[in-house]
Image (tube, coloured by chain):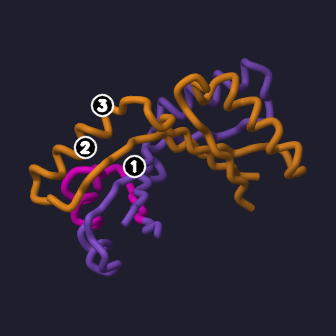
Chain colours: A purple, B orange
């Protein structure tokens, strides 16, 4: 089973990388770009067939390693 | 209008960051984790109402700044 995890900064947490991208786009001739936020996107191959169990395990992975839950949110999506 | 851009390494391009995440998860007690790939996830606020135009502009942004098209793929998604 394949899984996709998105890790994004929580609202209110400063995102200098996103700001840098936004400013660069503005300077490159894209004045329509406003707020930009950058996050992480992780694709995992899982040796697990039970969807509920996979989701619970992924949740544990996010809390233990993939996301810093003090400043980041995460979302889990199972594919196929 | 809000847009989401995913930037991922092309197949065949070595992903040391993904490998490191995979090995760490294996060691942390998640032996079911196989291949892991890490990509970027960018959320942009656009001052543009025309969907087709927004998509064309985003495509240009990806080619000019957000993605390195030699080694990376990108996908664009418009939200609301």
Chain of the residue displaying label 1 = A
The circle on residue B21 is 2
Check disc 1 and report the residue beneath it: A42
- Which residue is located at x 26 percent, y 65 percent? A47
Instruction: Classify A14 as above or below A10.
Output: above
Residue B29 or residue B5, whichever sits in front: B29
Callout 1: helix, strand or loop?
A: strand
- Which residue is located at x 52 percent, y 26 percent? B71
Give the magenta-colored segment's residue range. Answer: A58-76
> Where is the N terminus of chain A found, in terms of image quarters?
bottom left
Give the image location of residue B16, x and y in percent.
Answer: 30, 31
* Residues at marks 2 and 1, CA–CA distance in whole angstroms: 9 Å
Check disc 3 and report the residue beneath it: B16
Please give left or right for residue A51 compared with residue A41 in the image: left
Q: Give yes or no for contact between labels 2 and 3 (Cβ–Cβ under 8 Å).
A: no
* Residues at marks 3 and 1, CA–CA distance in whole angstroms: 13 Å
The circle on residue B6 is none
Residue A17 or residue B67, whichever sits in front: B67
């Amino acid at each position: 089973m394949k899984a996709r995890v998105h890790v994004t900064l929580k609202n209110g947490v400063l995102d200098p990388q996103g700001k840098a991208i936004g400013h660069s786009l503005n300077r490159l001739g894209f004045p329509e770009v406003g707020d930009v936020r950058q996050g992480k996107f992780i694709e995992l191959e899982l040796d697990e067939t039970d969807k509920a169990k996979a989701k619970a395990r992924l949740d544990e992975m996010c809390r233990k390693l993939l996301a810093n839950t003090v400043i980041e949110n995460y979302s889990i999506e199972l594919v196929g």
